[in-house]
Image: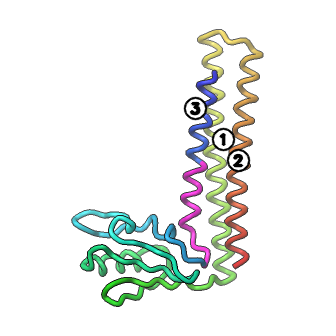
């Protein structure tokens, strides 16, 4: 049963990490290189993440500087930014790209808060599904290996305790992101 509970923790940790990565891509009015993590660029006959073809750095709080390693990729990077859902307009000087991050409007802040809430709920559901799988595995083990009812109950309580712990982590991350969005 310890193996099942350890597996639940590992999978729950993965769900929280995935949620953190999704939160990093949500624009908050502050320039952060993570904003471009999901951006893919047509380069060398493939679609590569922008951080594999350029250096991305944040300057002055509201400015991202993208310096491609190969200048011939500048138009491809610009195109990827323009066609993305970021809503940003790149400025190029032939050597690098500047991305000015505009201040968020109140309406946009509310939209982003809803996105964060939705993604947090998806992460909570993922953690609950992991709990469900763990409890089903414990119950199956009860039938196959003859675990006592007390052992099964202890296992279920541990699974619930782990679930509560990871949902608290998700809630804390979501709350921090909401605060970041609404207080800028």
Q: Which residue is mark 3?
A: 7
Looking at the image, tell me whether mark 2 or mark 1 is earlier in sequence order.
1
Q: Which residue is mark 1?
A: 128
Instruction: Classify mark 1: residues with Cα within 10 Å, few (<14), some (14-19) or many (20+).
Output: some
- Is 12 above or below relative to 142? below
Residue 7, image quadrant? top right
Inter-mark Cα distance, 3 to 2: 16 Å
Specify whether residue 23 is painted magenta.
yes
- Residue 13 at x, y percent in the picture: 60, 44
- Label 3 sits on a secondary structure element that is helix
Inter-mark Cα distance, 3 to 1: 14 Å
Magenta stretch, residue numbers: 16-29
- Is 164 above or below relative to 39? above
Which residue is at 65% across, 56% downward? 120
Q: Which residue is mark 2?
A: 167
- Residue 79 at x, y percent in the picture: 35, 79
The N terminus lies in which quarter of the figure?
top right
- Is 94 above or below relative to 30? below
- Residue 122 at x, y percent in the picture: 62, 52
**Do tag 2 and tag 1 residues touch (Cβ < 8 Å)?**
yes
- In the displayed structure, does residue 19 sit left or right of residue 166? left
- Is 140 above or below relative to 81? above
Specify whether residue 52 is painted magenta.
no
Inter-mark Cα distance, 2 to 1: 9 Å
The C terminus lies in which quarter of the figure?
bottom right
- Label 2 sits on a secondary structure element that is helix
Instruction: Classify mark 3: residues with Cα within 10 Å, few (<14), some (14-19) or many (20+).
Output: some
Looking at the image, tell me whether mark 3 or mark 1 is earlier in sequence order.
3
Q: How many marks?
A: 3
Which residue is at 59% across, 57% downward? 20
């Amino acid at each position: 049963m310890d193996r099942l509970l350890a597996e639940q923790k590992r999978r729950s940790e993965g769900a929280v990490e995935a949620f953190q990565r999704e939160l990093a891509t949500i624009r908050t009015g502050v320039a952060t290189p993570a904003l471009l993590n999901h951006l893919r660029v047509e380069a060398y006959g493939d679609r590569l993440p922008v951080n594999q073809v350029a250096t991305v750095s944040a300057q002055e709080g509201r400015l991202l500087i993208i310096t491609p390693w190969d200048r011939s990729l500048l138009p491809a990077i610009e195109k990827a930014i323009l066609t993305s859902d970021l809503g940003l307009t790149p400025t190029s000087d032939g050597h690098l790209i500047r991305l000015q991050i505009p201040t968020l409007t109140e309406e946009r802040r509310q939209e982003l808060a809803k996105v964060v809430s939705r993604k947090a709920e998806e992460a909570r559901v993922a953690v609950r599904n992991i709990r469900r799988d763990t409890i089903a595995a414990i119950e199956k083990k009860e039938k196959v290996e003859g675990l006592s009812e007390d052992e099964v109950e202890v296992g279920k309580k541990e699974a619930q305790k782990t679930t509560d712990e990871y949902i608290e982590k998700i809630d804390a991350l979501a709350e921090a992101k909401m605060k970041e969005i609404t207080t800028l």
